[in-house]
Amino acid sequence: RLLGCSEDEVEQYMPYMENAAASIMSTLKNHEDENDSRIVNLCAVTAYYQIVLSRQDDGIVSFKAGDVSYTRENNQAENAYKLLKAAQKDCAALVNESGFAFKAV
C-alpha cells in the first residue's frame, strides 16, 4: 500500500495502473514473464511514481507566524524515483531497452 489509500480511493488511480501495465507489458522480451513478481512490482512502482508526480506540489511546505516558522520538505517523488530505478534494474533481463534510435536513414 504505497499510496496509503482505501480500496474505494484506488479507483481514481486505475488509469495510471492500467497505463503502466500496458507500457511495461509491451516491452517484455517473453510474454510468459508477465506474472513474474519483478514485473508486477515494476508495474506497481511505475504507476506509483506517475501518481506521486501528478499529486506533487512544489515540494516544500512552510509557513511563518510571528517568530515561529515551520518548513517540511517533501521527498516522496525522490523516494518513488529510487523505487522505480531499483525495480527497473531488477527487470533489466526481462524487458527490452526502451530507448529510441534510428536504425537507418
Image: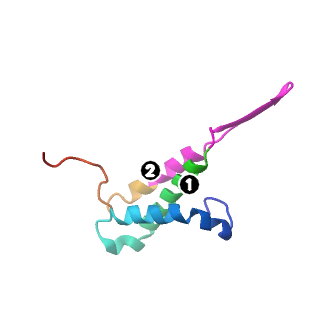
- As drawn, the residue found furthest toward the top would be 67
Q: Position of residue 80 (x, y in %)?
A: 54, 50
Residue 7, disc: none
Residue under label 2, please give it: 85
Q: Residue at x 30, y 49 (%)?
A: 99
Against 71, residue 97 (above or below) is: below
Q: Between residues 8 and 94, which one lies in front from this camera angle?
A: 8
Kindly state the secondary structure of the residue where label 1 is placed: helix
Asked if the magenta segment contains residue 24, the reply would be no
Which amino acid type is shown beneath numbered disc 1?
A: Ile
Residue lying at 28% horizontally and 65% vertically, measured from the top left: 29
Given residues 99 and 95, the one toward you in this image is 99
Classify 18 as above or below 80: below
Read off the magenta span. 57-86
11 in relation to 85, above or below: below
Residue pointed to by mark 1? 51
Asked whether, in this view, residue 3 is left or right of residue 50, the answer is right
Q: Neighbour class for label 2 at 10 Å: few (<14), some, many (≥20)?
A: some
Alpha carbons under labels 2 and 1: distance apart: 16 Å
Q: Residue at x 39, y 61 (%)?
A: 23
**63 drawn magenta:** yes
* Whether residue 15 can be seen here: yes
CB under 8 Å between discs 2 and 1: no
Where does the image place residue 8, in percent across and percent down from the top left? 67, 70
